[in-house]
């Protein structure tokens, strides 16, 4: 007996929105640079004050060494779980990076 699960289109769209754009995902399926995927925010401190363009975000992701990147908009709800392999990029309403941390 097989069970079929149907996901409403609106839920599928929300789940798809959580994934980083294809251009920010590594083509090999792993971190874009050598290492264990652990985030190092000090490597990307230069990005604070920069516009959060796709190119800037990709560079932050690569240079942080993190396996995941999470852009955070003003007032956006985020989980409180700590992920040493995730770089958090805080972005203001003007699309400017206001801070970067790991977790």
Image (cartoon, grey):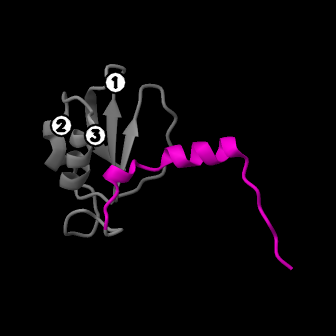
Q: Earlier in the sequence, mark 2 or mark 3?
A: 2
Mark 1 sits on what residue?
92
Give the CA separation, mark 3 to mark 1. Answer: 15 Å
Where is residue 26? Give x, y as percent: 31, 61
Which label sits in the foreground, 2 or 3? 3
Where is residue 58? Give x, y as percent: 25, 47
Q: Residue at x 27, y 56 (%)?
A: 39
Name the residue at the top extreme: 94
**Segment colored magenta:** 1-27
Of residues 90 and 81, the one nearer the viewer is 90
- Residue 67: assigned label: none
Residue 12, magenta (yes or no): yes
User: Mark 3–mark 1 contact, CB under 8 Å?
Assistant: no
Which label sits in the foreground, 3 or 1? 3
Dot 3 falls on a residue whose secondary structure is: helix
Give the CA separation, mark 2 to mark 1. Answer: 13 Å
Where is residue 65? Give x, y as percent: 23, 58
Mark 3 sits on what residue?
54
Mark 2 sits on what residue?
47
Examine the rendering and report whether any part of residue 54 can be seen. yes
Q: Earlier in the sequence, mark 3 or mark 1?
A: 3
User: What is the quadrant of residue 32 in the picture?
Assistant: bottom left
Give the CA separation, mark 2 to mark 3. Answer: 12 Å
Q: Earlier in the sequence, mark 2 or mark 1?
A: 2
């Amino acid at each position: 007996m097989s069970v079929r699960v149907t996901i409403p289109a609106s839920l599928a769209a929300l789940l798809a929105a959580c994934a980083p754009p294809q251009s920010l995902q590594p083509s090999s399926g792993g971190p874009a640079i050598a290492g264990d995927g652990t985030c190092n925010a000090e490597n990307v401190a230069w990005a604070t004050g920069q516009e959060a363009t796709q190119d800037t975000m990709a560079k932050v992701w690569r240079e942080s060494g993190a396996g995941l990147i999470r852009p955070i908009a003003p007032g956006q709800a985020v989980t409180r779980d700590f992920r040493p392999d995730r770089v958090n990029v805080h972005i203001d309403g003007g699309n400017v990076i206001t801070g970067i941390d790991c977790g």
